């Protein structure tokens, strides 16, 4: 009986831990591998984000985050603060200007 209760408790505990996380895909304006590093570094060191990985060819960043610690809008704002669009959230103008030319929108065209 004690073993059954332990198993039930473990199932409940693990279930409640995973229920707090959410996975999303966000379309960005990233252009290259340097953009990947900037976006992933920003998100992976943001409180509440558990995992972030940008696929450069598709410009889509996959983010796993804890909904109790950060909202989806805050995740998108973090991307915008680095200088990249995040779905409907536009990049911060000053941050875009601070990016190297190759990382600005359209920067990799013709290369």
Image (spheres, grey):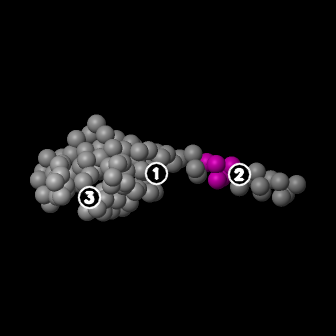
Tell me the tag on residue 87: none
The residue under the point 80% across, 53% down is 5
In the rendering, at what x and y percent does residue 14 appear? 64, 53
User: Left or right: 99 with respect to 65?
Assistant: left
User: Left or right: 59 with respect to 23?
Assistant: left
Quarter of the image for the C terminus: give it.
bottom left
Q: How many marks?
A: 3
Q: CA distance from mark 2 to mark 3?
A: 42 Å
In the rendering, at what x and y percent does residue 76 appear? 32, 45
Q: Residues within 10 Å of mark 1 (few under 14, many from 20)?
A: some
Residue annotated with mark 2? 11
Q: Is residue 53 magenta?
A: no
The residue under the point 22% across, 41% down is 90
User: Left or right: 27 with respect to 23?
Assistant: left
Residue nearest the viewer, comparing 47 with 61:
61
Q: Is residue 15 magenta?
A: yes
The residue under the point 26% across, 58% down is 32
Highlighted range, magenta:
12-16
Q: Residues within 10 Å of mark 2 (few under 14, many from 20)?
A: few
In the rendering, at what x and y percent does residue 37 appear? 30, 63
Task: Please state which of the two labelled residues, at mark 1 or mark 3, is closer to the viewer.
Answer: 3
Secondary structure category for the residue under label 2? helix
Residue annotated with mark 3? 32
Residue annotated with mark 1? 64
Task: Please state which of the two labelled residues, at mark 2 or mark 3, is closer to the viewer.
Answer: 3
Secondary structure category for the residue under label 1? strand
Quarter of the image for the N terminus: give it.
bottom right
């Amino acid at each position: 009986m004690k073993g059954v209760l332990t198993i039930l408790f473990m199932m409940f505990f693990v279930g409640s831990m995973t229920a707090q996380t959410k996975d999303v895909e966000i379309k960005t304006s990233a252009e290259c591998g340097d953009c990947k590093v900037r976006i992933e570094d920003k998100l992976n060191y943001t409180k509440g984000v558990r995992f972030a990985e940008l696929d450069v060819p598709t410009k889509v960043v996959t983010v796993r985050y804890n909904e109790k610690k950060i909202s989806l809008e805050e995740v998108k704002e973090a991307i915008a603060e680095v200088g990249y669009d995040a779905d409907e959230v536009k990049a911060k103008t000053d941050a875009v200007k601070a990016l190297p030319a190759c990382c600005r929108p359209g920067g990799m065209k013709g290369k």
